Amino acid sequence: MPTVDYQLATTVLQDLVRIPSVNPDLVTGADGEAKIASYIADTLDGWGLEVQVREITEGRPNVIATLKGTGGGQTLLFNGHMDTVGVEGMAEPYSGEVRDGRLYGRGAIDMKGSLAATMAATKGLIDSGITLRGSVIFTYVADEEYASIGTSAIADDIRQGRLRRPDGAVNTEATGLRVGVGHKGFTWLEVVTEGKAAHGSRPDLGVDAIAQMGKLLVEVDRLQGQLAAGAQHPLLGAGSVHASLVNGGREMSSYPGRCTLKLERRTVPPETADSVAEELEKIISRLSTEDPGFHASSRVMFVRNPWQADPRSQIVKTTAAAIEAVTGTPSTTMTQTGWLDSALLGDVGIPTVICGPSGEGLHAEVESIDVTSLGTCAEIYEEIIRRFCA
């Protein structure tokens, strides 16, 4: 039977919310993860887990905590991030106050609530005296909100054999207590159009690089229409594309010799960075054929792959069964439009699922978690561990 202490889950979450951990790559001078990592490491060490704190870059640690099994069982990994976005516009970002069944503050649902749920589940297992054959590895990571250097380091540790390869993984982002089975990816691209700088009074000499970029922007809009009307992924729908940033020109009285466009292309399986790059190169090639004066180049800047769970995997089936056992109702599935660290675990071949609590206000000025769902989520995590590792 589950042995989760709901009040412990709430108290731990209040402690976590009251420790600022805004990502310093998003807000210059922000606290980062060092203080919250210390709290998590000290707490879990005090409960008897084997704990390591690994600094990924200066002041940006991961916490890796292991609840060791007796041997002969499966290894399970739980993954969640310690960093948050900024708090501009929030009246009381670090209050942790509970009102009308909700706990408020930055990170309450994204995703310190999930971290508190894993910790409460762990304490419940320890206090129950259960013997697990398999080990449970908890990775509390840095930097998911910017470049995911934390989970990238975990994935690299697994790839290089520095961390035991788990048989399954739970990414603990919020899912409303549903089984998360997929999310989109993204590729960032840069396009540069080349013009010819000249005095604004000399159209005979100048070539307007910004106007040239306009031709490509028309094609980007056309591509978005084609994607929306085209083949749909059965879970994630269609990919998309939009222009994010444009920069060109030096002053009013000059023809701009160069214009730079940055695009975001949201992807669904089986789309890849290579297929997206080829898609853009075909547009540039066609524009160059139609207009010999059109000169442009493109490059891929950054890639995060889309991800889809294997519905036949044990971790997906175990998570669904655990939700049903705890809630008394059949589990349901869901997908995310945004990208999550689960893709990095999937990229190294680990069967992965997403499961987390219910809340509101991710990245918003008012953020909260449903306190009952916090405790229920901790029970679900405990049940997953019992079924997968015992």
Image: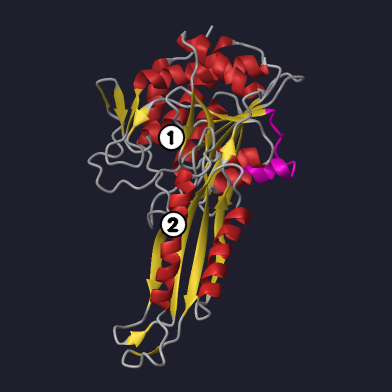
Mark 2 lies on residue: 222
In the rendered image, which residue does mark 1 sit on? 111
- What number of labels is visible? 2
Q: In which quarter of the image is residue 108?
A: top left
Q: Does the magenta stretch include residue 163?
A: yes
Question: Element type at marker 2?
Answer: helix
**Residue 221 vertical placement versus 75 (above, below):** below
Q: Which range is magenta?
A: 154-167
The picture places residue 120, in percent across and down from the top left corner, at 48, 21
Horizontal and vertical percent position of residue 313: 66, 24
> Does 59 sit above or below residue 193?
above
- Res 224 seen here: yes
* Residue in the picture at 39% in, 28% down: 13
Q: Which amino acid does label 2 sit on?
A: Arg
Q: Residue 139, position in %: x, y?
A: 57, 35
Q: What element carries label 1?
A: helix
Question: Would you place residue 259 above or below residue 263 in this image?
Answer: below
Earlier residue among tags 2 and 1 = 1
Q: Residue furthest front?
A: 290
Q: Which residue is drawn at 54% across and 74% down?
A: 288
Q: Nearer the viewer, mark 2 or mark 1?
A: 2
Residue 124 in view (yes/no): no
The residue positioned 28% from the left and 49% from the top of the image is 88
Nearest the camera: 89 or 14? 89
> Could you say where residue 130 lies in the image, as x and y percent from the top left?
62, 11
Q: Residue 174 carries which label?
A: none
Which residue corresponds to the image point at 77% horizontal and 19% vertical from the top-left?
Answer: 72
